[in-house]
Amino acid sequence: MNRKRSIIFLKDILILACTAFGGPQVHLMMMIDRLVEKRRYLTEGELLELQALCQVLPGPTSTQTVVALAYKMRGAGFAYLTLLVWSLPAMSLMISAAIGVHYLEKNEISLSFTRFIGPMAVAFLIHGGYKIASKVIHNVMGWGLFILSAIFIYFYPSPYNTPIVIVAGAIIASFNFGKQERMEKDRFSVNWGNLALWAGVLIFAASLGALTKALPIRLFENFYRNGSMVFGGGQVLIPMLYNEFVEFKGMMTQNEFLSGMALTQLVPGPVFSIATYVGSIVMQQYGVGGQIIGGVMATAGIFLPGVFLIFFAYRIWNQLKQFRGVRASLEGIHATSSGLTIAAAINMIIPLIQQDKWSPLIILLTLIIVITTRIPAYYLILGGLLIGVLFQL
């Protein structure tokens, strides 16, 4: 791949980063249009297989897909540059949003114009969880794991329970390997370098944070840990961050979180940009500079694990899928991840109803519109903000 072609590729990724709304499914269609049909960087089959690999791993699916493609083209250095181009627009917008929210709160300007955004965001979460579940769950066992994981996390919402539930689902589903087609096995060879890098950064960040007690380092470690455990994309990351930073640690208010959750519908690029917003809000007591640092540390923390892991897994994917148990475990991962999404939505609905009696109606109306029309989510959020402003006036 020559230099000119590389620059064109980065330009294409930047265009996608500025126009790709709606999460991995929508991102995939746009990637097929621009990267496959228009530019011919790879075939549609290669892109679909690449995304399938990314869905197996923890981390942001769309981000891992474009990074893996860049890695395939020109190696690790070019992949990191692609990551920067892909994540920069969303990171900049979400840091700006967090600074704006803090400015309004600091100057005692009412945020009541966002009153409809929280319920609308919960409606998007419910719809997202249902869509994911309907696509990935195909039998009674899957739906059973979905229901059990939702019930367990609803009653025990600790962030530390999330990976336990996901791993348990994977183990249970792996016993259903008999229905998977046998594949001829080649000699298994593994390069452990990137996996060691992933583990080394995690241990170093946790140790440094414990020694220094520095909030930016602790934020990086928190998001790096979350980014290492998120199966199922942004819809699963959102409840994990809500449980940890609102319910468990109380480092931000529910209204602040829901505002950021809704704003992710207005921002193009990776849904994981909610992490940028959370990191920036947590650092708001240190001024604008602190918020920028918090947003950058959170962004680095949430994206790097997925990048290290895709570099590791990309080299052994064809070997891993030889094993029927690995393929069978995916259904358990997807089912429990979908259950976590629904549990988070239920946990968010109850306090919303306590704050505003109209919340159930807003949730219902938003769900009806999302299900029956093709109106983009960001249009609905903008409409909700406009109606909120009119009510406030």
Image (cartoon, grey):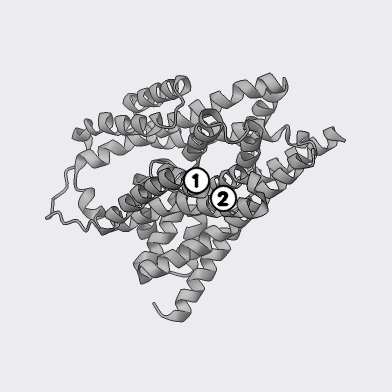
Does dot 2 land on a helix, a strand or a loop?
A: helix
* Quadrant of res 360: top right
- Across and down, in percent, residue 287 comes to 67, 50
Question: Residue at the spot x=38%, y=36% of the render?
Answer: 334
Whether residue 357 sits left or right of residue 243 in the image: it is: right
Alpha-carbon distance for marks 1 and 2?
7 Å
* Residue type, numbered disc 2: Gly
Question: Residue at the spot x=84%, y=34% of the render?
Answer: 392
- Across and down, in percent, residue 90 comes to 59, 55
- In the picture, the disc for residue 329 is none
User: Which one is earlier in the sequence, the residue at label 1 or at label 2?
Assistant: 1
Q: Are marks 1 and 2 in contact (CB under 8 Å)?
A: yes
Instruction: Give the answer, above or below, for where 14 lies relative to 4.
Output: above
Can residue 137 be seen here? no
Can residue 50 be seen here? yes
Question: Residue at the spot x=36%, y=34% of the render?
Answer: 163
Between 357 and 287, the residue placed more toward the observer is 287
Whether residue 247 sits left or right of residue 335 in the image: it is: right
Instruction: Identify the residue position indicated by label 2 in the image.
Output: 294
User: As drawn, which residue projects farthest toward the right?
Assistant: 393
Instruction: Identify the residue position indicated by label 1 in the image.
Output: 219
* Quadrant of res 312: bottom left
Instruction: Give the answer, above or below, for where 182 lies relative to 303.
Output: above
- Across and down, in percent, residue 189 comes to 16, 56
* Residue type, numbered disc 1: Leu
Question: Residue at the spot x=74%, y=46% of the render?
Answer: 103
